[in-house]
């Protein structure tokens, strides 16, 4: 039976907290320890997704827990990595790129999304993310799908977890042309 991990990526932009919750399965006889999952995510996932971001965005920590048994204590790994691009003082702190996750099944419970904070000013116009903004994430999406997608090179598989039980493997990811709007969460409030 597959082990499912809940991985929370947390960071800050202009003093506001952002976070994404992502689920992975591991289908092997021996389940890895939480710290091993965190090390994998730090070495690969964080690197894929931080590189297109301005260095105003700081990835702070990775929190790993068992998605099927939340009574176990989670493991917290401090990351402290900034985005891979030069800083920009015209970033919008409450808008986000919406990264859509799709499975082979239709319906809202069979897809997911992530919000990547602080769209570059030139990436959105007239309320939409333009081609430059969509292209900005192409390498991160491609690298993620190679490592964690249908033909994953990693022992981990990216999935969408259903609210009640079960999961579906992610088969594709794309940037939505509609920016997400995230509520501002000041550090220390709301968690």
Image (tube, rainbow, N blue to C red):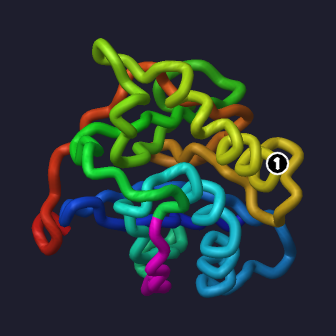
- Left or right, 33 with reference to 119: right
Left or right: 112 as drawn, with respect to 10: right
Residue 111: percent from the left, percent from the top?
54, 32
Up-down relation of residue 74 to residue 141 (above or below): below
Looking at this view, is 22 or 137 the one in front?
Answer: 137
Left or right of 5? Residue 61 is: left
Q: Quadrant of the C terminus?
A: bottom left
Closer-to-camera residue (176/26): 176
Q: Mark 1 points at which residue?
A: 146
Quadrant holding the N terminus? bottom right
On screen, residue 106 above or below 187:
above
- Residue at the location (28% across, 60% down)? 13
Toward which corner of the image does residue 90 lie, by quadrant? top left
For the point 34% across and 51% down, which residue is it? 88
Most prominent secondary structure in the magenta stretch?
strand
Please state the horizontal and vertical placement of residue 119, each as a whole percent of the image: 37, 39
Task: Give the residue drawn at x 47%, y 20%.
Answer: 130
Q: How far from the left and from the top, in percent, is residue 151? A: 88, 46
Quadrant of the image occupied by residue 50: bottom right
**Which residues are the magenta region?**
73-82
């Amino acid at each position: 039976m597959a082990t499912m991990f809940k991985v929370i990526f947390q960071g800050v932009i202009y003093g506001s907290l952002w976070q994404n919750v992502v689920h992975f399965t591991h289908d092997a006889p021996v389940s890895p320890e939480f710290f091993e999952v965190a090390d994998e995510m730090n070495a690969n996932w964080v690197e894929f997704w931080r590189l297109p971001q301005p260095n105003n965005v700081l990835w702070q920590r990775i929190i790993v827990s068992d998605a099927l048994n939340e009574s176990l204590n989670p493991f917290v790994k401090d990351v402290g990595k900034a985005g891979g691009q030069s800083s920009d003082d015209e970033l919008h702190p409450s808008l986000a790129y919406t990264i859509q996750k799709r499975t082979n099944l239709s319906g809202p419970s069979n897809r997911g999304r992530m919000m990547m904070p602080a769209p570059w000013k030139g990436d959105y116009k007239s309320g939409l993310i333009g081609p430059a903004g969509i292209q900005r994430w192409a390498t991160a999406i491609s690298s993620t799908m190679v490592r964690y997608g249908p033909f994953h090179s990693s022992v981990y598989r990216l999935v969408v977890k259903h609210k009640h039980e079960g999961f579906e493997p992610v088969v594709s990811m794309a940037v939505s042309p509609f920016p997400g709007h995230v509520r501002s969460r000041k550090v220390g409030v709301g968690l």
